[in-house]
Image (spheres, rainbow, N blue to C red):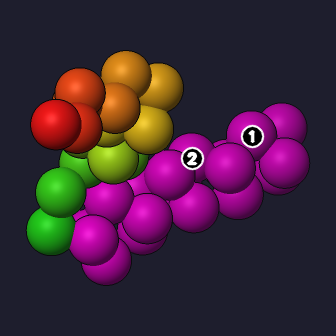
Amino acid sequence: ENIVDEIQEHEFVRPLLPPTPADDIIIPFQTPPPMP
């Protein structure tokens, strides 16, 4: 139970540090835009 609480805390702290959500950061890496 404590482990879950710690994980939730980390997840809440992470999004606050970067201005963009993790999803926006991960998506570009998964599907990079076609470079000319």
Could you give the CA–CA distance between mark 2 and mark 1, rounded to whole angstroms? 6 Å
Of the 4 image quadrants, the one containing the N terminus is top right
Residue plotted at (15% across, 68% down): 19
Label at residue 8: 2
Q: Position of residue 3 (x, y in %)?
A: 84, 48
Q: Residue furthest front?
A: 36
- The amino acid type of the residue labelled 1 equals Val
Label at residue 4: 1
- Proximity of marks 2 and 1: CB atoms separated by less than 8 Å: yes
Relative horizontal placement of residue 13, taking residue 15 as reference (left or right):
right
Dot 1, crowdedness within 10 Å: few (<14), some or many (≥20)? Answer: few
Q: Give SS at disc 1.
A: helix
Q: Position of residue 12 (x, y in %)?
A: 40, 56
Relative horizontal placement of residue 7, taking residue 17 as reference (left or right):
right
Residue 10 picture quarter: bottom right
Relative horizontal placement of residue 23, taking residue 8 as reference (left or right):
left
Relative horizontal placement of residue 11, taking residue 16 as reference (left or right):
right
Where does the magenta region start and end?
A: 1-18
